[in-house]
Image (cartoon, helix red, strand yellow):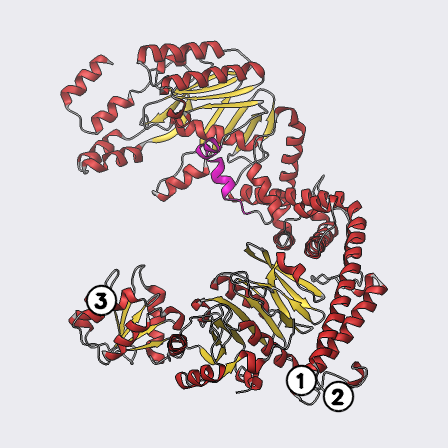
Amino acid sequence: MITLTFEQKKSLGFQYLLDSLRPNCVYGQELVKQAAPYPGEEREALKEELCRLSCLVDSYEANKNRWDSLELILMNVKEIRGTLKKGAESVLTDLELFELKQFLLQSEKLRRLYEDNPGLRLSEIVFADTAPALDLLDPEGRRLPGFYISDAYAPELKAVREEKKRLEAVLRWEDILEEEKAPDATLRQEDVQGEYPAYSQERRRRLLAERSEAVAEEERIQMRIRAELTEKLRPWFPFLWENVRAMGRLDFLLQKTKLALGCHGVCPELTDHTLSLRDMTNPELAEGLRERGKTFTPISFAMDNGTAVITGANMGGKSVALKTIALNVVLALSGFFVCAGEARIPVFDDICLITEEYQSPRDGLSSFGGEMVQLKKALACQREGYALLIFDELARGTNPDEGAAIVKAVVRYLKERPVMAVLATHYDHVAQDADYHYQAAGLADADMERLSAEIKSADSRKRIDIISNYMNYGIYQVREREECPRDAIRICGLLGLEPELLRLMEAEA
Amino acid sequence: MRPEGLSSLLENYTSLSLAGMCKNAGKTTVLNYLLRELGQKDTRVALTSIGRDGETVDVVTGTGKPRIYVREGTLFATAAGLLRNCDTTGEILKTTGIHTPLGEVVLVRTRSDGFIDLAGPSTNRQLIELSAMFRAYGPDKILIDGAVSRRSLCSRQVAQAVILCAGASYHRDITRVIADTAYICSLLQITAEAGKAAAFAIRQWQGKKAPFEKLLFLDPEGNCRAAGPGKNLVDALRERENADYPMVWLEGAVTDAVVRPLLLSNIPLRGHLFLAEDSSKILLSREVCEKLYQKGARLAVLEEIALLAVCINPFSAYGDHFDKAEFRERMENAVSLPVIDVLEDCDDYIDL
């Protein structure tokens, strides 16, 4: 079972994508809110969901108008579950019956549209035919949105309402008598039985009392009808629940489709032990870069079981790479398309993330202590199932010698175990022990002459920006052992540190 | 006057709000009278209230209150929790998405005559929203029963016309009741004097103004000059560049706090016209308002509301009843409007 906290969803950029979805009804909204990776044992369900999504993505454009009208219907669907729960135990009120009728009306519209257009149908999403339930609430078959207990339900209701109406007509007549006006056109003499020579307060009082009796009788009959109606509707409730679920799933799928089309995602292929992602992006980070006039460098990454180490200098984009890998794995396992050109992703039982953001001083531990507690948990979950472990700058908080030793030990420990671990670190020599070694490109292929020329003429505050413009945030796989570029010292030079100090740095390195 | 004419006063307007100076001012009695008259003319009425009203016993003072009696075919909007207090046969048409402590506001059409219990939305914005929903069902008139001292209900955005109800429950002193009522009437009767060109200039400026910009200087030709964000009224009026503009638009509420510094300053105000959105935005105390006029300035609004009549109730919920003849006569002298005594003229025709 993979559980991500809200902070983790946010930090990966998963929450950003969820927030960009615009579900039409409360049921869809709820599924968006609950979106999370499928547990490992529900692999088949995940496969089916991805397959449905794939179908929908492929056929969406061709049926766009129909899907739009379907979304319009979904927008009119109101929350009905409270009423269904209440109706299972007690008699529904007029307002609840009204809400039920609204739901049934929308449900019927939706079912018609969905069933009549084979192009829209998706496997396992079906709408139950609830027309007979709607007939119960619309005995006259008018299919209008209003609801009241109509005369058609019982002849005695009709009778008492007629009696009430007669009394009300007389009361109206009384009003006119009281004002000594001529009878108005709407009131006919035959409505008023007997002679009414003059207005009398006494008679009005009696009429109102009689009307009250009729009202009480009407209410008694209406209560009986409400009870009968609820009783007759109850067997339909399971179908209504089914439709509620179908509406939610369909709404959610539609939003996922729009997201997939919007970010040119691909359907991930589920594998057993191979992770391979080509040209991944992270839409939230990409959006942030776009606002600053920069573009996101797509990242490619592949590994089988074991450990992968991403090395590189500061500012080099190691954390970005980690977040992007994690985001796309989470997307795939949650039944979304991934933001990549091609994706093969294993079904993990668990994903563990240890990054700086999650170490909270709240627990009363130093950042190092907190990290080690997290590490212990991560290693435990690795023993329980097939896990993806992601560590960003593990042991950064301690002294570099011991820090490097810790990272090295973790890499060795996880090597050749049935686990995938991705570590970003700037202790570059630990990479020797890893199964895979990636290097953040950084300034490796930058035109250093142009960069130094540009930087010389620039304001000291703008230098960081200029350097980041020349940075390549992509990562590449290091096949053979090669010398890691010393970008940190290079950056110091570019930022204009004392030459003597730089010389000393070079000598030490 | 006999209130036969009450509904004919309303002839040229499609929406009316009933505002009360206090509780037990007789609003519901007036409303019932109006409903009966409109009913006899076959007018299709839509009805709601701002806040809670229409209960049989006044929740605040415990005095008996009349209930609202409507005809078949009336539209009304009330909180779901009060539907069971309504004894008409009612068809639920729509749930509005407006929530109150008594439940969501629901639109109902009556399929018989009967008593209803109203608790509508509690803000003007919701009331405007609700009016739009009403209009989809094509009523001839929309009536809004106001809660106590809801001056905002007199906003032109809510209703075109207003009837003000005043009663002995407002204060023991009849002179005070009459003076305060007359003052509120005078505010509600403030006219739109700015002219089309100036009104247009104000709307244009509102569309592009910065936040915290509250003052705009204008002349009748529509030439205008904004005072700038955060500027206070006294400083702005002292500026030489603003001297040529005789009109000042005051964005938002016009309160004592805005006007008092002006009265204390030595700025000549003769001939100045201060403009507000509508009279619901003018919240000046009588004293401050009078001083402003004494200094030769005047107030005007952009959107007029029609004050149709004053209804009075000499019966006090607290026991200090007024002499009805005296109350009526003095009120008639104080306001240049039809005055209706709710007990005498409207009668308690729905006897409880």
Q: CA distance from mark 3 to mark 1?
A: 57 Å
Q: Nearer the viewer, residue A180 or B119?
A: A180
Mark 1 sits on what residue? Answer: A178
Q: Name which residue type carries label 2.
A: Pro
Residue on which the image places disc 3: B261
Q: Quadrant of residue B87?
A: bottom right
In the figure, is residue A203 to the left or right of A34?
right
In which quadrant of the rendered view does residue A42 lie? top right
Q: Are marks 3 and 2 on the same chain?
A: no
Residue B30: quarter of image:
bottom right
Provide the chain ID for the residue under circle 2: A
User: Which chain letter goes with mark 3?
Assistant: B
Label 3, residues with CA under 10 Å away: few <14, some 14-19, many ≥20: few
Q: CA distance from mark 1 to mark 2?
A: 11 Å
Is residue B301 among the parts visible in the rendering?
Answer: yes
Give residue A433's position: percent from left, percent from top.
43, 10
- Could you say whether the residue bearing mark 1 is in a helix, strand or loop? helix
Q: Main secondary structure of the magenta part?
A: helix
Q: Secondary structure at mark 2?
A: loop
Front residue of A164/A407: it is: A164
**Is residue A12 within the magenta segment?**
yes
- Using the image as rendered, state which of residue A320 and residue B83 is in the foreground: B83
Q: Quadrant of the C terminus of chain A?
A: top left
Check whether the beta carbons of the residues at disc 3 and disc 2 lie within 8 A of each other. no
Numbered disc 3: secondary structure: helix
Q: Label 1 crowding class (10 Å Cα cut-off): few <14, some 14-19, many 20+?
A: some
x%, y% of residue A353?
47, 24
User: In this picture, which residue range is highlighted in magenta?
Assistant: A6-22
Q: In the image, which disc is placed on residue A197?
A: 2
